[in-house]
Image (cartoon, grey):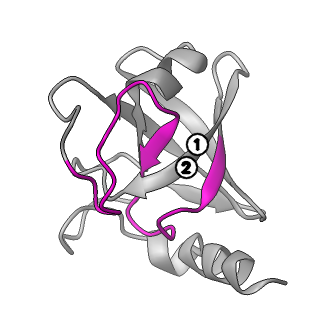
Amino acid sequence: MSRVALVIALAMSPAMHAEAGSHGKKTAKTTRILDGHQVGKASWYGPGFHGKKTASGQVFNQHALTAAHPHLPLGSRVKVTNLKNGKEVEVTINDRGPHKAGRIIDLSRAAAKKIAMGGQAQVKVVAIPN
């Protein structure tokens, strides 16, 4: 297993996600891990953050296929599947978030459109090995 794959596997371990929430606050369990896949609620962000710096130092572009995740390494790639319709998108993690309890990933506006997601959707997140 490559070093990045190991970091991603550790980041997606049940221990890291048993209690999800922002800033160390304990909240109800919001995600489950199945064979290395993270399943939970996704949301999206766009116009209010467009042009601002992300945690990676990149400027956020709501039209790019990117996402915010609380633990995965910046620059890692994941496949996000909308569990309601089966549509998939590959995104690069370039920011930290989501900052609302009960969510596992924030997609850019473009990524949310690719999977035909409204404001929120139940998704599966799978790390893509490099």
Q: Which residue is mark 1?
A: 91
Residue found 29% across the figure and 46% down from its top: 59
Q: Position of residue 127 (x, y in %)?
A: 69, 58
Quadrant of the frame with the C terminus: bottom right
* Res. 30 visible in picture: no
Picture quarter containing residue 81? Answer: top right
Question: Which amino acid, mark 1?
Answer: Val
Q: Provide the residue span drawn in magenta.
A: 53-79
- 4 or 86: which is nearer to us? 4
Residue found 45% across the figure and 71% down from its top: 18
Picture quarter containing residue 71? Answer: bottom left
Q: Position of residue 97 (x, y in %)?
A: 30, 54
Mark-to-mark CA distance, 1 and 2:
4 Å
- Mark 2 Cα shell of 10 Å, populated few (<14), some (14-19), many (≥20): many
Question: Which amino acid, mark 2?
Answer: Thr
Q: Is residue 69 magenta?
A: yes
Q: Position of residue 103 (x, y in %)?
A: 36, 46
80 shown above or below 97? above
Q: Which mark is residue 92?
A: 2
